[in-house]
Image: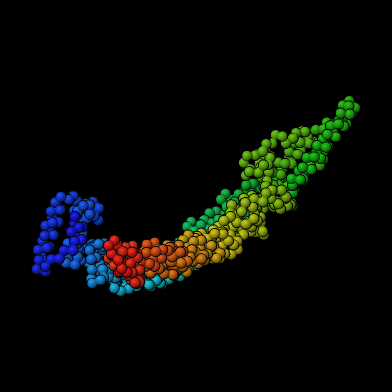
């Protein structure tokens, strides 16, 4: 019924205008009293008339146009349009033919109707300018237009106005992290003071600008300058005191105890002489002589040999000699036994037993004895066993393997292990040890456990590891530590041959810091990063990604992972179609959505009902299904109307 009344061609005299308005108001009040609230009228609590929502207009002109909409979220001649949701709080009004957002724009928008995008670098911007008013979209930029790149040494972006970094990457300091830390810093320095976290080996002080004491090895304490350890020959806190004069291979830094002594000395500090009749060196701890001067014997060579001992030389017996004597003794004993069976005891007063024969032989040809260090030590004991075997037909079966012979599977003679030596000189020194794990004049020493596989040999007076050193050691006898930066090093130099101790360093000496933009570690030889921090690319992650990348870029190709809103392409350097809203596809450029009034895959045409260069002019009111973007000519007319417009 309401529709019929509005469609009637009623003419009221001008003087009766307000009377007409009053009558219409009374009519609507009467209708509303019988209507129920609608649930589909865009949230407005209005009444329905024959199932149709009351118009949003609360003040209508005589020509049917609206002077005042029910709510400032609507606009149009009949308040038929919602305010753009780009308007802050969706509030707007008509200003001549323009829709103007009354409370400002949502973030990222600008212009009268907030239909234009802020510059892509801004999250918020001036309504009628290019300047940014909120944080930069990419936190690695700053300035009034968010076009100035923060220092590449900032870790978490920078201040939008000043460009000052919040914190710096290792190796940099200053407001903008554009000053390198002192050269000998390790693990970075304080952003404001420049104080180093720790120092490279060899340096000390707040800024690592003082050298460690000259005899330090492996560096010194950053704050106190106390040496970590000393080079061989020095001791005490600053390694400025020499070791006791008779030390060999250095001494303990704190105690001064010698590692070993030069020949002729013993004791913790090698300040006690060996017993006078020792030949060569003696045991550092016990003073036990390794061997005696001719004519002396005993643990400390303080007992004289018996007078019948020869003193001109020592009999040299080898394992091979012992074996030959044993075999010959077996043959002779067997032959004599068979000969004795053919004799008769009655035949002769000259008949003698085997035992008597052996005894008489021994008396007629007494052995020319020599004196060994112990009264019945190894080789004399072996001689006694041989005689016992020949005379009494005994064997070595009574001797059992020893369990205390340093792991050598040897036999015991009178409870004494066979020596480790298999080739002895006439002077009693060893030419060849049983196993290359032993060394010394009598093979009495174990090879250092710093030797690879514990194998070594004597080279003049030096012990030399034959198969190299275990990890972290170097030198002839692998007794020196590698530089602290290395896990393995050259045997006779300072170059690293294995991974760096700190995986964030590289180079021949592991002293060059990996790029601060590496995410994990870098190649020990080349310094190439495995992967980069977001925002960087290149072998050493020292090239910034293209400015419009979002989420970083590929380390090798530089291709952006994704683009900031408004850009597309491999390097995000191509702008999206101008009427895209919320960006476009990086590869195809297809818009995700369009600005109000625009439509199409690339937002290049107007939405039905709009026309004009900016698709911000509504089509003639009686058009149906839209109109031509440029001319405004209707595609079709609503029922009851005709013509182009």
Q: In the rendered view, does 582 fall on the left or right side of 447? A: left
Residues 348 and 157: in front is 157
Q: In the rendered view, does 402 fall on the left or right side of 320? A: left
Residue 581 locus on image (x, y percent): 36, 64
473 relative to 358, above or below? below
| Whether residue 224 can be seen here | no
Q: Residue drawn 51% across and 57% down?
A: 252
Picture quadrant of residue 342: top right
246 relative to 98, above or below? above
Q: In the rendered view, does 458 fall on the left or right side of 285? A: right
Q: Residue drawn 74% across and 45% down?
A: 319
Quadrant where the image shows the N terminus: bottom left
Residues 193 and 424: in front is 193
Residue 394 locus on image (x, y percent): 75, 33
Residues 381 and 159: in front is 159
314 relative to 238, above or below? above
Quadrant where the image shows the C terminus: bottom left
Residues 43 and 206: in front is 43
Residue 68 locus on image (x, y percent): 18, 65
Residue 430 locus on image (x, y percent): 70, 52
Q: Residue drawn 75% across and 39% down?
A: 386
Residue farthest toward the right in the current orientation of the protein: 347
Q: In the rendered view, does 335 fall on the left or right side of 417? A: right
Display colour scheme:
rainbow
Q: Total label count?
A: 0
Residue farthest toward the top in the current orientation of the protein: 346
| Whether residue 14 can be seen here | yes
Q: Residue drawn 74% across and 35% down?
A: 395
């Amino acid at each position: 019924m309401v529709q019929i009344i509005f469609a009637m061609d009623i003419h009221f005299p001008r003087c009766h205008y307000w009377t007409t308005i009053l009558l219409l108001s009374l009519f609507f009040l009467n209708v509303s009293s019988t209507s129920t609230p609608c649930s589909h009228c865009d949230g407005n609590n209005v009444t329905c008339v024959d199932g149709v929502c009351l118009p949003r207009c609360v003040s209508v002109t005589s020509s049917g146009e609206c002077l005042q909409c029910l709510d400032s979220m609507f606009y149009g001649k009949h308040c038929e349009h919602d305010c753009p949701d780009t308007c802050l709080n969706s509030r707007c009004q008509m200003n001549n033919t323009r829709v103007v957002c009354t409370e400002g724009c949502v973030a990222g928008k600008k212009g009268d109707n907030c239909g234009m995008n802020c510059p892509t670098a801004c999250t918020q911007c001036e309504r009628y300018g290019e300047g940014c008013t909120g944080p930069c979209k990419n936190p690695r930029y700053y300035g009034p237009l968010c076009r100035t790149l923060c220092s590449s040494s900032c870790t978490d972006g920078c201040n939008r106005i000043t460009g000052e970094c919040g914190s710096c990457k290792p190796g940099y300091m200053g407001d903008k992290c554009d000053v390198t830390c002192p050269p000998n810093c390790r693990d970075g320095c304080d952003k404001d003071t420049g104080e180093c976290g720790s120092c490279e080996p060899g340096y000390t002080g707040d800024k690592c600008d003082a050298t460690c004491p000259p005899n330090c090895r492996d560096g010194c304490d950053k704050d106190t300058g106390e040496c970590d350890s000393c080079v061989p020959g020095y001791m005490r806190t600053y390694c400025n005191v020499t070791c006791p004069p008779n030390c060999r291979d250095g001494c303990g830094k704190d105690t001064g105890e010698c590692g070993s002594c030069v020949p002729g000395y013993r004791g913790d500090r090698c300040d006690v002489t060996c017993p006078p009749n020792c030949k060569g060196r003696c045991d550092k701890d016990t003073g036990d002589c390794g061997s005696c001067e001719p004519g002396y014997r005993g643990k400390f060579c303080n007992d004289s040999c018996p007078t019948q001992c020869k003193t001109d030389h020592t009999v040299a017996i080898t394992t091979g000699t012992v074996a030959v004597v044993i075999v010959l003794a077996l043959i002779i004993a067997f032959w004599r036994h068979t000969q004795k069976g053919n004799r008769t005891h009655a035949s002769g007063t000259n008949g003698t037993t085997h035992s008597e024969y052996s005894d008489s032989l021994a008396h007629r040809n007494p052995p020319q004895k020599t004196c060994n260090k112990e009264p019945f030590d190894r080789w004399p004991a072996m001689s006694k066993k041989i005689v016992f075997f020949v005379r009494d037909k005994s064997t070595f079966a009574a001797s059992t393997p020893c369990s205390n012979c340093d792991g050598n599977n040897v036999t015991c003679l009178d409870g004494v292990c066979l020596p480790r030596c298999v080739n002895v000189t006439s002077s009693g020194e060893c030419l060849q040890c049983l196993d290359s794990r032993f060394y010394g004049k009598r093979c009495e020493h174990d090879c250092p456990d710093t030797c690879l596989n514990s194998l070594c040999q004597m080279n003049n007076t030096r012990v030399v590891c034959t198969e190299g050193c275990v990890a972290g050691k170097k030198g002839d006898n692998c007794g020196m530590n590698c530089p602290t930066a290395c896990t393995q090093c050259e045997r006779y130099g300072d170059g690293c041959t294995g991974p760096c101790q700190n995986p964030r360093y590289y180079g021949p000496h592991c002293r060059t810091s990996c790029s601060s933009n590496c995410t994990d570690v870098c190649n020990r030889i080349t310094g190439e990063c495995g992967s980069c921090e977001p925002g960087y690319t290149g072998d050493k992650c020292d090239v910034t990604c293209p400015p419009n990348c979002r989420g970083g870029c590929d380390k090798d190709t530089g291709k952006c992972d994704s683009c900031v809103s408004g850009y597309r392409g491999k390097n995000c350097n191509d702008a999206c179609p101008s009427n895209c809203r919320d960006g476009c596809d990086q590869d195809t450029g297809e818009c995700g959505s369009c600005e109000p009034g625009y439509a199409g895959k690339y937002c290049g045409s107007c939405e039905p009902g709009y026309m004009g260069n900016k698709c911000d002019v509504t089509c003639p009111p009686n058009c149906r299904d839209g109109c031509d973007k440029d001319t405004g000519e209707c595609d079709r007319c609503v029922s009851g109307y005709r013509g182009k417009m």
